[in-house]
Every structure is written in C-alpha cells, then in structure tokens.
Amino acid sequence: MVRKFQRFSEVTDLIGFMVLCCGNRFPKVGAFGDDQSENLEVAFLQLQEGLPLIAKKLGNDEKLREVENLIGASLVAYRAGDRMRGAHLLQDIENIIYPERFVEYAARKGEPL
C-alpha cells in the first residue's frame, strides 16, 4: 500500500518514523506487518511518493536531486544492514529540507545557538 500525502508535514513525519524504525524495528501498524524487509521497501516507496511535496518545498532542482540520491543511498545502507548510516542519510535529507531547524528550535526555547 502506497501512501498518498496531503501535507508536507506528513512527509517529514514519515522521515522521522523511518529514522526510528528502519532496519528491523517497524511496528505492526498501517502498511507495516511482520516482514521487516518488506516494511523497509514499503517505507521507501512511501517516501518516494512524498517527493513532489519535497520538490515544492525546496523549489530547487539541484537540492531535489541531492534528496533523491540520499534516499537511494539510505535504502542501500539499510539493505546492507548499516542502520546507522541509513539513518544518518535520512537525517541529511531533513537538514536539506530544514537547514535552520536547530536554530529555529533554539530560538523558540530562548536559547543561544
């Protein structure tokens, strides 16, 4: 089952979910069942479905290609059993989408960065 995203925040929520669950930690919810390998493939298919919303947010073809390459590299890492590298590559995507996310967080908390 491929997910149809309505909002950009749903795509970023999926990325966070993937960082936590990809590899072998998917719960049995929604499209995810007992087969962790299949769950991995489903999650990345869902992320691919979110690319139009990512493209709209970025407004930059070069950055979009970088995101697409990171998605592919992350999937390769997870398939090879390198959970840490796969997660770090997904986090690199988050950094491209929200380059100022930690600065914004610190500002909301009233903390210097």
Image: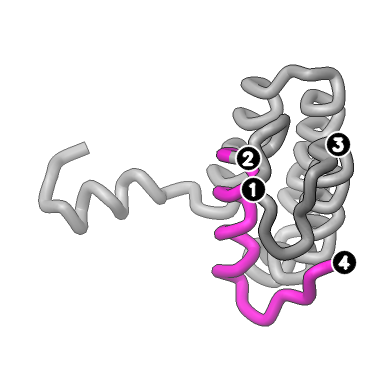
Viewer-proximal residue, 56 or 60?
56
Q: Residues within 10 Å of mark 1 (few under 14, many from 20)?
A: few
Q: Earlier in the sequence, mark 3 or mark 1?
A: 1
Assess whether mark 1 and mark 3 are in contact (beta carbons under 8 angstroms). no
Assess whether mark 1 and mark 2 are in contact (beta carbons under 8 angstroms). yes
Q: Residue at x 11, y 52 (%)?
A: 110
Cα distance, mark 1 to mark 4? 16 Å
Predominant SS along the magenta part: helix
Q: Residue at x 61, y 71 (%)?
A: 8
Q: Residue at x 79, y 70 (%)?
A: 3
Task: Check disc 1 and give the amino acid type.
Answer: Pro
Cα distance, mark 3 to mark 2? 12 Å
Q: Secondary structure at mark 2?
A: helix
Cα distance, mark 3 to mark 1? 13 Å
Viewer-proximal residue, 60 or 75?
75
| Residue under label 4 | 1
| Residue under label 2 | 21
Q: Kindly tell me whether residue 69 is visible in this rendering.
A: no
Specify the quadrant that holds the N terminus: bottom right
| Residue under label 1 | 27
